[in-house]
Image (cartoon, rainbow, N blue to C red):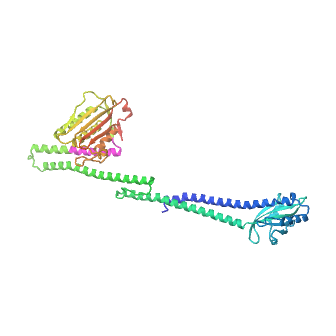
């Protein structure tokens, strides 16, 4: 588990948190120790300050008066249960104690020696006695009128209980620190699992998607409705889109293969018929019919290949436009005239009346625009039944002086509401029963976008289809802002 993101979290975040908690615990232990010891020290200091009442001005005329006063002080000392009091003569020998027991001769009094040197005449000591007991003591030196030490009073407090209290509090603080660290680790592990586990599953799913396996990626399960959940939904949607696109691509390849095979079969069949017929035995009518089929199907093959090449150029960004100022009416009229004979031969009506007025020019590639016109009119004728009508008109009005519209309406089968938003997508083909590769509208829509125009489709199942092509009119100086050859 602890690898990748988990390992980085353990090394970075947890190490920082651990360091901070240790510093806090150590600081609190230090503060507690200081507070307790300072409290004892302050108690000793306040108690020793009472000597000003026993030895006024901390002065004594003689050792005899000092001993007498000290004895009275020790006998009447009211804090015997809290601390021990020792009276030390000028030579450093203990002459009396509040407990009645004299200390060992080996016992050292470092605070007494330091107090004699100290200008304040007192000193503290924190250490252990010969018995091993931890104590804190303060010694205050008593001097005579000549500032000569005549003795000292030493106060001693046992630190065993204080140290035990400090240790208990320190143990509690350490336990709290350990609990906090444990909670941080536990919450971190749970948090990491909630992130890392779904991400690893997503990684496995993404690897399967990369190898073309979409079986387990349509709906990725997740526990929390958060960013990870959004990511799982996004991957699921992506997988579904890829699966759909993959299916559409396979259908496209199948359709294109069929579209290529049909004319090739016709061409090959008629070519073999002409080749196998004895020279001079093939009548002119059959010969002309065969050559007509070969020419027609060759043109169809050329159209399919050109459409595929255009699609490839658009996908790779290599579509080239040869822009110029042109008459859109003339280009569209030629396209309609080109398809008139086909409409008549199929028993369909292609209606178009060229406007008698002169329309403003547009700026674009006439061959590409003619390709769009042929594609739209070809689709309209393909999906219109025999006896049906395909009507076209060019519209330019003062209400919209910056654009020219070409509207093509057919009385064909129409497009369902479910298929309508997808008909301009690559590989998509709403009606599988009609010939076509499924990329013609995608190419036409891209060409219109390259001309800063638009291709809009309105349709309903059983009510026909209306396609509107919108072109911006040419404006002076447009050729300076738009290169003659556009390579995208």
**Residue 225: percent from left, percent from top:** 44, 54
Residue 298: image quadrant is top left
Q: Which residues are magenta?
A: 298-319
Quadrant containing the C terminus is top left
**Residue 108: percent from left, percent from top:** 80, 68
Instruction: Please tell me whether residue 68 is drawn above or below residue 483 in the rendered image.
Output: below
Residue 452 shown left or right of residue 111 in the figure: left
Residue 112: image quadrant is bottom right
Front-most of residues 286 and 358: 358
Q: Is residue 163 visible?
A: yes
Residue 26: image quadrant is bottom right
| Residue located at (27% from left, 51% from top) | 251
Residue 146 shown left or right of residue 325 in the figure: right
* Outermost residue to the top: 357
Picture mark count = 0
Front-most of residues 348 and 43: 43
Front-most of residues 322 and 281: 322
| Residue 325, magenta (yes or no) | no
Instruction: Please tell me whether residue 198 is drawn above or below residue 319 in the rendered image.
Output: below
Instruction: Please tell me whether residue 289 is drawn above or below residue 197 in the rendered image.
Output: above
| Residue 304, magenta (yes or no) | yes
**Residue 88: percent from left, percent from top:** 84, 66
Main SS category, magenta section: helix
Front-most of residues 484 and 471: 471
| Residue located at (30% from left, 37% from top) | 469
Q: Is residue 364 visible?
A: no
**Residue 393: percent from left, percent from top:** 25, 33
């Amino acid at each position: 588990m602890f690898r990748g993101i988990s390992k980085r979290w353990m090394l970075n975040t947890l190490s920082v948190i651990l360091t901070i908690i240790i510093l806090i615990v150590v600081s609190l232990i230090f503060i507690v120790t200081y507070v307790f010891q300072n409290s004892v020290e302050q108690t000793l200091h306040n108690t020793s300050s009472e000597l000003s009442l026993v030895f006024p001005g901390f002065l004594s005329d003689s050792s005899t008066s000092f001993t007498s006063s000290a004895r009275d002080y020790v006998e009447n000392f009211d804090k015997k249960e809290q601390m021990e009091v020792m009276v030390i003569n000028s030579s450093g020998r203990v002459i009396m104690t509040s407990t009645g027991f004299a200390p060992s001769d080996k016992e050292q009094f470092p605070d007494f020696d330091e107090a004699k040197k100290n200008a304040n005449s007192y000193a503290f000591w924190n250490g252990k006695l010969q018995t091993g007991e931890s104590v804190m003591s303060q010694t205050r030196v008593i001097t005579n009128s000549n500032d000569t030490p005549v003795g000292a009073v030493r106060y001693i407090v046992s630190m065993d209980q204080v140290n035990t209290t400090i240790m208990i509090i320190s143990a509690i603080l350490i336990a709290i620190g350990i609990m906090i660290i444990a909670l941080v680790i536990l919450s971190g592990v749970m948090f990491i699992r909630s992130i890392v586990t779904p991400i690893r599953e997503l990684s496995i799913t993404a690897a399967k998607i990369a190898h073309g396996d979409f079986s387990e990626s349509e709906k990725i399960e997740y526990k929390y409705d958060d960013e990870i959940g959004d990511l799982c939904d996004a991957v699921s949607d992506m997988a579904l889109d890829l699966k759909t696109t993959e299916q559409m691509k396979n259908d496209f390849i199948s359709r294109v293969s069929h579209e290529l095979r049909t004319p090739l079969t016709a061409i090959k069949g008629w070519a073999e018929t002409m080749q196998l017929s004895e020279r001079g035995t093939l009548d002119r009518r059959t010969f002309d019919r065969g050559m007509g089929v070969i020419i027609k199907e060759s043109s169809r093959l050329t159209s399919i290949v050109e459409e595929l090449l255009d699609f490839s150029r658009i996908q790779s960004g290599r579509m080239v436009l040869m822009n110029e100022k042109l008459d859109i009416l003339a280009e569209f009229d030629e396209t309609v005239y080109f398809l008139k004979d086909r409409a008549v031969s199929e028993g369909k009506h292609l209606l178009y009346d060229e406007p008698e007025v002169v329309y403003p020019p547009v700026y674009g590639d006439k061959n590409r625009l003619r390709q769009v016109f042929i594609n739209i009119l070809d689709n309209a004728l393909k999906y219109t039944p025999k006896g049906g009508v395909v009507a076209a008109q060019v519209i330019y009005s003062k209400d919209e002086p910056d654009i020219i519209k070409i509207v093509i309406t057919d009385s064909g089968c129409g497009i369902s509401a479910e298929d309508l938003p997808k008909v301009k997508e690559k590989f998509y083909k709403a009606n599988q029963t009609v010939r076509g590769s499924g990329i013609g509208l995608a190419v036409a829509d891209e060409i219109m976008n390259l001309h800063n125009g638009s291709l809009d489709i309105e349709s309903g199942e059983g009510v026909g289809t209306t396609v509107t092509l919108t072109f911006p009119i040419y404006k002076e100086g447009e050729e300076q802002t738009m290169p003659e050859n556009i390579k995208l």
